[in-house]
Amino acid sequence: MSSLGKGDSEQMVPDINRNRVAEILQQLVRIPSINPAFPGGTGEAELGRYVEEFLLRLNLPAERQVVAEGRFNVLGTLPGRSQRKLLLEAHMDTVQTIGMTIPPFDGTIEGGKLYGRGACDTKASLAAMLAAIEVLALAGIRPEVTIELAAVVDEETTYIGVSALAERIKPDAAEYIGAVVGEPTGLDIISAHKGCCRFYVDVNGIACHSSNPALGINAIDQTSKVLSFVNELHERRYPQRAHPLTGPPTVCVTGIQGGVAPNTVPAHCRITVDRRTVPGEEPLIVYEEMKRELEELAGAEGLELTVSEPFVIDYAMETDQKEPIVRYLLTATQTYEPQAIIRGAAYCSDASKLVRVAVPSVVFGPGHISEAHTQDEWIELIQVEQAVCALRDLILNVKTI
Ligand SMILES: [Zn+2]
């Protein structure tokens, strides 16, 4: 890997040391940073301090952006020769470790893989960004654009980290050529992804003794009509709204609660609805549409139901493939991974919050989403090295125009 530098021919391209890349990732994995919303949640503060010290040791400015009590983003800068900026962003939090079949915080390396909670999602991306910045800082390189690093909190639940970052960027968004948001994409460049809207539907019936169910109205039976309607939307209507990169919107029921006793006809049943939106769909409009249709269904079928306000709204995102950030990153990545492509994704990420303040953003990083949040989470180290090389070349080659 060390000889793969492909920056501008007249520019020095510092080598990447694969052992150092693995060492940085191992250090990140060994610091627990479970989102406090999850069981065993430690918060991200210790990892934030690591990133801060990492930057300060390189004599780079590092700043804490406090977003909640005990929770802060760390913002660093690799100064460039212009005011134009390139943002490298990755989240520090991970999901819980319950049920893991490997030691979650050992960072064991075996067979070219590094194991641990967050190894794939998304400490490998953060390690790649840190390693690229380190090698350029140690070589005394001042790139044409100023590089900002943001290690943020709370991607796995409510996005308070990136939301605070986006608010800060908003007045100066025009200075940004773009942002690379670290997530496991298998080194593909994600230029569009879905958003989501989640809400509850409560269906009411009339309780009675289950020895004579005809005396009541079974709320679970009534809910089955709502389930059929939701499946109808998913299977028949939404495929016609497919987006070329993300595929069609989807909807599914992700929770159900009902019944109080084995011998009582239930008077109440609640379902959780998860509607995934595609670029171009406004989640609140989508929500209003579903609410209206569910109420029409209730009228037609004689159901008594209420649709809650959404408890999660997240936006889909799309960045024009002609944006310089997309082109430069694709070129840089294909040097090391010729199979890398531009594509869409079904999941949500921090990128949509940056796109909403007009920073052209892509999602990019080593590892595959199918390896994230797993019992034996791991990352292939070769992909992390390829990501470091791609980010280094992106930083060296990206132009201010
Ligand atoms: Zn992630």
Image (cartoon, rainbow, N blue to C red):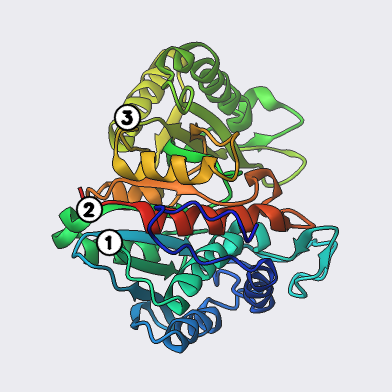
Residue 4 as seen in the image, left or right of residue 307: right
Report which quarter residue 378 is drawn in: bottom right
- Which residue, given by chain and number where applicable, does mark 2 sit on? 400
Q: Amino acid at mark 1?
A: Glu
Identity of the residue drawn at 66% across and 42% down: 259
Q: Quadrant of residue 89?
A: bottom left
Amino acid type of the residue tagged 3 in the rendering:
Glu
Lateral position of residue 375 relative to residue 158, left or right = right
Element assignment for label 1 = loop
Is the residue under label 3 in contact with that under label 2 (CB below 8 Å)?
Answer: no
Give the alpha-carbon distance from disc 2 to disc 3, as whole Å.
32 Å
Q: Is residue 93 visible?
A: no
Q: Are marks 1 and 2 in contact (CB under 8 Å)?
A: yes
Q: Which residue is mark 3?
A: 281
Is 29 positioned to the left or the right of 398 in the image?
A: right
| Mark 3 vs 1, N-terminal side | 1
Q: In the image, residue 357 lies at what x, y percent?
A: 23, 51
Which residue occupies the foreground of this view, 299 or 168? 168
- Which element type, helix, strand or loop, lies under badge 2? loop
Position of residue 239 measured from the top left corner of the image (x, y, whole percent): 48, 15
Where 60 sits versus 151, above or below?
below
- Residue 379 lies, in percent from the top left, at 71, 56
Label 1 vs 2, first from the N-terminus? 1
Between residues 306 and 394, which one lies in front from this camera angle? 394
Label 3 environment density (alpha carbons within 10 Å; few <14, some 14–19, many ≥20): some
Q: Earlier in the sequence, mark 2 or mark 3?
A: 3
Whether tag 3 and tag 1 are in contact, CB under 8 A, the answer is no
- Tell me if the residue at label 2 has its CB under 8 Å from ligand 1: no
Q: Which residue is mark 1?
A: 144
